[in-house]
Image: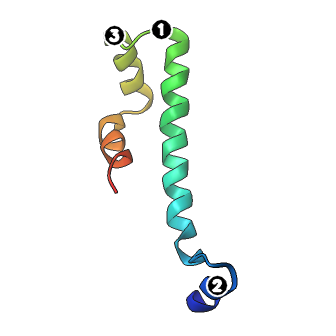
Amino acid sequence: MGMLSQLKYGIDWSSMGTMFLRIAAILLCLVVHELCHIREKNHGPGFYALLERYLPDWRERKKQLFMN
C-alpha cells in the first residue's frame, strides 16, 4: 500500500500519523502558552509557574519541538 499511495499522490501517507501527532503536540504547547498569557502578560516567574502547573513537562516538549 505504501508504494501505491506514493505513486498515486506523491506523498507517503503512512507517515501522516506521525506528522499529525507532531502537529497536535505543537498546537497543545502553543495553546497552553497563550492561555497562560491571559493571567501573566510576560515571561516572568509567575508565567513559568503557571505553565509548569498546566504543562509540567513543557521543557521536554520544547526540546522535542526543535528536534528533527
Under mark 2, the amino acid is Ser
The image position of residue 32, as x and y in percent, is 51, 29
Give the image quarter of residue 55: top left
Residue of label 3: 44
Please name which of the two marks, 1 or 2, marks the residue nearer to the observer. 2
Q: Is residue 43 above or below residue 62?
A: above
Give the image quarter of residue 63: top left
The image position of residue 14, as x and y in percent, is 55, 77
Q: Which mark is residue 41?
A: 1
Residue of label 2: 5
Give the image quarter of residue 3: bottom right
Judge the density around disc 3: few (<14), some (14-19), many (≥20) Cα neighbours within 10 Å.
few
Residue 60 as seen in the image, left or right of residue 25: left
Describe the element under mark 3 as helix, strand or loop.
Answer: loop
Task: Residue at 35%, 39% (x, y): give it.
Answer: 62
The image position of residue 50, as x and y in percent, is 41, 19
Under mark 1, the amino acid is Lys
Q: Is residue 33 above or below residue 9?
A: above
Residue 57 or residue 13, whichever sits in front: 13
Under mark 3, the amino acid is Gly
Task: Residue at 36%, 35% (x, y): give it.
Answer: 58
